[in-house]
Image (spheres, helix red, strand yellow):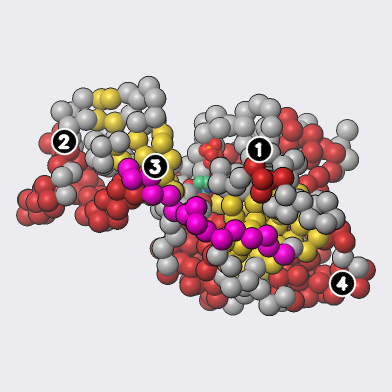
């Protein structure tokens, strides 16, 4: 009871008393869970996030100095350069200094698939899931280099159980089971348009995944970071679950980054056209960064250098490499939160269910690429779109299962 009274007091002070609206209806365990959830809320953080959203305070400023960033075009390397990078990279893999991590905690809203996106079948004759397809090159690298690359998979509270079961049912797709480790990403409360933390249909705090940038803090919380450090891993590639052509165990990527003494790297593909709605690598206030398509002017989009190349043309494909020293540091710092206006059903302060017909609440997410700004330098490796990028984002049209399947078949020469 003491805890209840204390929590009530805290809620009153923060003007969030609606959070206890279903308390009396919960069983003992539920009551305990709700009180614990509320004690975990950082009300100061929630207030700041809400105020920033209301005042339209974007995390990035119009006054930022945006400049192009140097990149290495893999297809233009000389044979000697290529071989040197390859040697450096292969040595990293062979000496077990590489681990890979798949962020698979997203909801896949645009695809509209219920369940973990990694379970999705893009329609190949083999009906392999995205998880199985991204596992294949890892298995090949293991065979080639005589190692077993540790594979970490970040799930969400929503999809963890189903993801783990899927791996078990499929015998881990032939990957050594003890080298596949799952961990759950963090969550943050959703807020109504008037700043109230929402209550979900079960009477608990309505939480939502905190974005793929949550990977760093979740690695700390779950012990993954400790595990990586204990294994003396030096480099970690972090990639998405929804690109079946992703090449994470890539010696050239590792070799370029290590040889240039960079602490992080990102793969890019040339923008399909100046208007493509993608984030591109750049320098922001002299630091590596990504500029979103919503932020970039028409003029910058179309700017070309003397060779006719787009100046801001390096699309971020979300396949990134970090030196473990920097992962340790990034995990200790806060990444900025970005607000998304979403539809959310919730229980109101009178205990009534509100069904959202239009966006009515804010969800807050952090992004991996915001970690780039804490790097003094970063290697960008331009790879070929047709070899490494077949994203599955939308149900139809651009970046859909149909386009991904075609690209996949073309690359692997499947009839
Ligand atoms: P996206 O940002 O494209 O999100 O994720 P999504 O969930 O796949 O799709 P939408 O936006 O809801 O339609 C890029 C990668 O980041 C992961 C996704 O699982 C995907 O691999 N991700 C995204 C997380 O792991 N956690 C998140 O909170 C968000």
Earlier in the chain: of badge 1 and badge 4, it is 4
Residue corresponding to mark 4: 81
Per the model, the C-alpha gap separating discs 4 and 2 is 65 Å
Closer mark to the observer between disc 1 and disc 4: 4
Name the residue at the right extreme: 79
* Sequence-earlier tag: 4 or 3: 4
Q: What stretch is highlighted in magenta?
A: 54-70
State the CA–CA distance, disc 1 to disc 3: 22 Å
Residue 208 coordinates in the image, percent (x, y): 39, 43
Please, is residue 1 above or below residue 121 in the view? below
Lower sequence index among marks 1 and 3: 3
Earlier in the chain: of badge 4 and badge 2, it is 2
Q: Do the residues labelled 1 and 4 touch (CB within 8 Å)?
A: no
| Residue 291 visible in the current orientation | yes
Helix, strand or loop for disc 1: loop
> Residue at image x 29%, y 31%?
346
Label of residue 392 in the image: 1
Quadrant where the image shows the C terminus: top right
Question: Residue under circle 2?
Answer: 21
Judge depth for marks 4 and 2 and give the one in front. 4
Residue that mark 3 sits on? 363
Labels 3, 2: front one: 3
- Looking at the rendered structure, the secondary structure element under dot 4 is helix
């Amino acid at each position: 009871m003491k805890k209840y009274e204390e929590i009530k007091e805290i809620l009153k002070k923060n003007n969030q008393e609606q959070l206890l609206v279903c308390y009396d209806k919960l069983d003992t365990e539920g009551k305990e869970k709700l009180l614990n959830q509320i004690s975990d809320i950082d009300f100061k953080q929630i207030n700041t996030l809400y105020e920033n959203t209301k005042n339209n305070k974007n995390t990035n400023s119009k006054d930022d100095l945006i400049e192009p960033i140097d990149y290495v075009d893999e297809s233009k390397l000389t044979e000697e350069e290529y071989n040197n990078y390859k040697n450096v990279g292969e040595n990293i893999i062979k000496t077990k200094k590489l681990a890979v991590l798949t962020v698979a905690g997203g909801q896949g809203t645009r695809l509209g698939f219920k369940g973990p996106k990694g379970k999705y079948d893009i329609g190949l004759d083999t009906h392999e899931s995205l998880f199985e397809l991204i596992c294949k090159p890892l298995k090949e690298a293991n065979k080639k280099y005589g190692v077993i690359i540790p594979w970490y998979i970040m799930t969400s509270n929503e999809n963890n159980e189903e993801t783990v079961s899927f791996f078990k049912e499929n015998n881990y797709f032939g990957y050594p089971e003890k080298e596949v480790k799952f961990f759950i990403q963090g969550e943050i409360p959703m807020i109504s348009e008037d700043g109230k933390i929402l209550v979900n249909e079960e009477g608990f705090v309505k939480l939502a995944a905190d974005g793929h940038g949550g990977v760093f803090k979740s690695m700390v919380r779950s012990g993954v970071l400790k595990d990586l450090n204990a294994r003396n891993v030096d480099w970690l590639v972090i990639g998405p679950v929804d690109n079946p052509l992703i090449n994470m165990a890539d010696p050239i990527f590792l070799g370029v980054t290590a040889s240039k003494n960079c602490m992080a790297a990102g793969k890019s593909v040339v923008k399909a056209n100046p208007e493509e709605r993608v984030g591109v690598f750049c320098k922001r206030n002299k630091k590596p960064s990504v500029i979103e398509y919503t932020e970039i002017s028409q003029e910058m989009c179309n700017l070309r250098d003397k060779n006719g190349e787009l100046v801001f043309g390096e699309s971020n494909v979300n396949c990134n490499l970090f030196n473990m020293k920097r992962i340790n540091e990034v995990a200790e710092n806060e990444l900025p939160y970005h607000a998304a206006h979403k539809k959310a059903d919730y229980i109101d302060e009178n205990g009534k269910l509100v069904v959202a017909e239009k966006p009515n609440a804010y969800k807050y997410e952090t992004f991996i690429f915001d970690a780039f700004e804490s790097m003094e330098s970063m290697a960008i490796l331009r790879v070929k779109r047709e070899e490494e990028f077949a994203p599955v984002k939308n149900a139809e049209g651009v970046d859909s299962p149909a386009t991904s399947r075609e690209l996949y078949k073309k690359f692997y020469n499947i009839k």
